[in-house]
């Protein structure tokens, strides 16, 4: 049991130096503070094999925890220190009182105390707890939310870790212990919100029967500070309520949503709000009635407003049309800037197409000046080898967050725009599509756990580096031995780029097999099918070259970016080479910066991806002495699959593109099999 990955990063293997928290002082009580004590107890049991003691007075313990209402806390931390902490922030401070050292974990709220406890335990486990500790932390985003694409029949759209965790058929009566384990894991990394169901939402989720199932989950999650949200189907008034239509300006429809909101909050008083995918990929929406996204979002926002609920309205919209798909979200949403209620936030996928291994950032970020915007990442690896490939995604997340949009001049990174630094908004949030299922190890691949972890850590603090996050995750999940930590960290940090190289280097995108999105199919074609779902739409290979011309002479998608980016992306000689074929159609003989022609560079990139997966395998084989056999073997066999798949990608893509380029594959790369 201990070695099957089910414990995630909460293994609490004994560290080198143990800070003595055998007695914990706390003079308050609440369900959340009880969870904080419980967590300290789990850790102490694991470190020392004993239960912790609790005390109400500070003389006894060397660890004091509590809120700004606690006497023990206010006697050592001045009230002004709490001014800046907000709801979730905390202080961890070494306090010397009458010659006696103790560590105090304090917050304005009990959930802040729980977050502080997890931080303290992380420091111990990663051997970073210093005697003179003085930490002040608060999250960069208010809402740090997972999106589950879980259906009510327990299948998970783009889920690769088994069926859904939510056993709808058993709820609300039978409560799986994994519900609490899930909430606890999220709290340990600061995730405070979750959308339980698929954005391709069934109207049924809003039925009374399901709301009571949702309530049962919300009740378990609450002490861990995890709020429940639901994805809603825009046609619910018609489909579930039996109304003739779901027109957002229809009084009956408005009343239906108002009544529904009232009902929801009578069952789940702290319900978070709605996530909506509308007029996208065939789903219903306000445009079905000639209304706008703003009309639809505002109607829902008004219904939720009395209860402080919010609407996360997705900008993932596109239609088969003459417009480049990468431009469509911007074209639809920009005219609506300023028309949304203040409890609406626009949820934008990191890239303009769809979670590809590499995309430029969506040009909508920063562009809507008057509307709060949030990023949607995808943790589940729909386009990065499912749960078979090791792809550590923190570098991908950071690439987006650190991108400079130039929207308010230089330094207008997506992080600063969405976290409210540059444009104070009432709402700040960040979302990611979860990779969690009922698999014993939660995520299918042991290393896929690191992406859940990394999302939580970056949602809390986007200034953390990918390296820091990998470092702490490895130490808590596997081993603190440097002989293991360093080489494995190197694998993780190189892994996403390796996937880009063996799947779609240099800005290539969407050349996946139609439907499942796992393997390569650049040749894919469905006669009469939607062109914007066909790979050739994106790669445009012919005898002259390869790539999508999004420059001024092409679709002019570059014009949606701020200067100087639009000029840089427009100019093939200045465009970053890792996005070259995204923005340009490039002749096979085009000279790259390193002197190679484009065709040769493509061959070397694919080959380099394959070679990297081989080196991951080699390194991993040497890791056997450091960890348990079960996880060692699980990862080993997954790395084998990854390496074989990399060869498959390289060969399929190069042999296919070669039918156009008619050029030889350089002799020093691994020949296709
Ligand atoms: C992708 C994915 C779909 C999903 C959609 C979305 O297109 O393949 O399964 O529904 O994104 O984000 O809405």
Image (cartoon, helix red, strand yellow):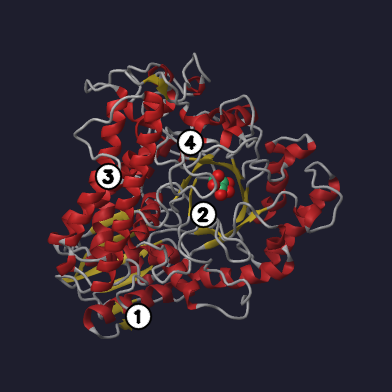
Q: Which dot, 1 or 3, sits closer to the camera? A: 3
Quadrant of the rendered image containing residue 569: top left
User: How far across and how far down the image is residue 546, in percent?
Assistant: 41, 24
Q: What element carries label 4?
A: loop
- Mark 2–mark 4 distance (CA, rounded to whole Å): 23 Å
What residue sits 35% from the left and 72% below the top?
7
Q: Decide: is 465 above or below 58.
A: above
- Is any part of residue 12 visible from this angle? no
Asked if the residues shown at circle 1 and circle 3 are in contact, with their CB atoms under 8 angstroms apart, the answer is no
State which tag comes first along the sequence, 3 or 2: 2
User: Which sits earlier in the primary sequence, circle 2 or circle 4?
Assistant: 2
The foreground one among 169 and 133 is: 169
Mark nearer the N terminus (3 vs 4): 4
Circle 3 residue: 610
Asked whether the residues under the numbered discs 3 and 2 touch, taking CB atoms below 8 Å apart as contact, a structural biologist would say: no
Q: Distance between the residues labelled 1 and 3?
A: 59 Å
Residue assigned mark 2: 158
The Cα atoms of the two marked residues, 3 and 4, are separated by: 21 Å
Considering every residue shown, the one lying at the far left of the view is 483
The image shows residue 478 at horizontal and vertical percentages of 24, 66
The residue wearing badge 1 is 56
């Amino acid at each position: 049991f201990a070695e099957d990955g089910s414990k995630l990063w909460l293994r609490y293997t004994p560290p080198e130096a143990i800070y003595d928290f055998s007695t914990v002082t706390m003079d308050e009580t609440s369900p959340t503070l009880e969870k904080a004590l419980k967590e300290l107890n789990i850790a102490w049991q694991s470190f020392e094999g004993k239960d912790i003691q609790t005390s109400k007075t500070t003389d006894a313990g060397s660890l004091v925890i509590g809120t700004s209402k606690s006497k023990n806390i206010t006697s050592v931390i001045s009230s002004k220190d709490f001014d800046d902490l907000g709801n979730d922030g905390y202080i961890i401070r070494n306090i010397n009182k009458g010659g006696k050292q103790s560590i105090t974990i304090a917050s304005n709220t009990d959930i802040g105390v729980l977050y502080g406890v997890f931080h303290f335990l992380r420091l111990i486990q990663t051997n970073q707890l210093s005697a003179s500790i003085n930490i002040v932390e608060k999250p960069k985003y208010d809402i740090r939310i997972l999106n589950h694409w879980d259906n009510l029949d327990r299948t998970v759209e783009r889920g690769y870790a088994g069926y859904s965790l939510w056993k709808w058929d058993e709820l609300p009566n039978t409560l799986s212990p994994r519900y609490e384990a899930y909430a606890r894991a999220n709290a340990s990394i600061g995730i405070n919100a979750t959308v339980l169901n698929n954005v391709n939402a069934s109207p049924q989720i809003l039925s009374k029967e399901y709301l009571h199932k949702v309530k049962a989950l919300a009740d378990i999650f609450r002490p861990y500070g995890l709020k429940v949200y639901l994805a809603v189907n825009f046609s619910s008034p018609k489909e579930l309520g039996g109304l003739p239509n779901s027109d957002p300006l229809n009084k009956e429809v408005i009343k239906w949503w108002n009544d529904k909101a009232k009902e929801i909050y009578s069952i789940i008083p702290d319900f978070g709000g709605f996530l909506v995918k509308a007029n996208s990929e065939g789903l219903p929406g306000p445009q079905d009635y000639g209304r706008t996204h703003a009309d639809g979002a505002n109607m829902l926002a008004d219904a939720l407003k009395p209860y402080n609920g919010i609407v996360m309205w997705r900008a993932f919209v596109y239609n088969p049309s003459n417009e480049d798909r990468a431009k469509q979200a911007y074209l639809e949403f920009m005219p609506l800037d300023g028309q949304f209620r203040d409890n609406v936030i626009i949820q934008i996928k990191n890239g303009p197409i769809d979670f590809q291994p590499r995309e430029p950032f969506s040009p909508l970020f920063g562009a809507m000046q008057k509307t709060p915007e949030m990023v949607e990442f995808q943790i589940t690896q729909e386009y990065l080898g499912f749960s078979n490939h090791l792809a550590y995604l923190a570098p991908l997340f950071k690439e987006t967050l650190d991108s400079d949009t130039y929207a308010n001049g230089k330094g207008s990174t997506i992080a600063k725009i969405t976290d409210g630094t540059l444009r104070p908004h009432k709402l700040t949030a960040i979302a990611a599509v979860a990779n969690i299922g009922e698999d014993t190890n939660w995520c299918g691949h042991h290393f896929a756990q690191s992406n859940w972890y990394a999302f939580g850590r970056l949602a809390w603090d986007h200034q953390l580096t990918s390296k820091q996050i990998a470092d702490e995750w490895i130490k808590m999940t596997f081993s603190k031995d440097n002989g293991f930590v360093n080489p494995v960290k190197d694998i993780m940090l190189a892994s996403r780029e390796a996937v880009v190289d063996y799947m779609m280097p240099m800005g290539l995108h969407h050349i996946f097999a139609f439907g499942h999105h796992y393997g390569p199919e650049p040749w894919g074609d469905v006669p009469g099918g939607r062109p914007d779902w066909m790979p050739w739409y994106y790669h445009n290979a012919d005898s002259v070259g390869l790539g999508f011309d999004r420059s001024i002479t092409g679709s002019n998608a570059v014009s949606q970016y701020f200067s100087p980016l639009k000029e840089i992306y427009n100019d093939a000689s200045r465009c970053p080479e890792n996005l070259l074929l995204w923005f340009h159609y490039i002749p096979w003989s085009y000279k790259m910066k390193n002197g190679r022609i484009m065709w040769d560079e493509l061959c070397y990139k694919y080959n380099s991806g394959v070679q990297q997966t081989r080196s991951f395998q080699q390194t991993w084989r040497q890791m056997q002495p450091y960890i348990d056999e079960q996880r060692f073997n699980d990862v080993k066999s997954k790395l084998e699959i990854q390496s074989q798949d990399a060869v498959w990608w390289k060969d399929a893509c190069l042999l296919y593109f070669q039918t156009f380029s008619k050029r030889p594959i350089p002799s020093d790369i691994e020949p296709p099999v």
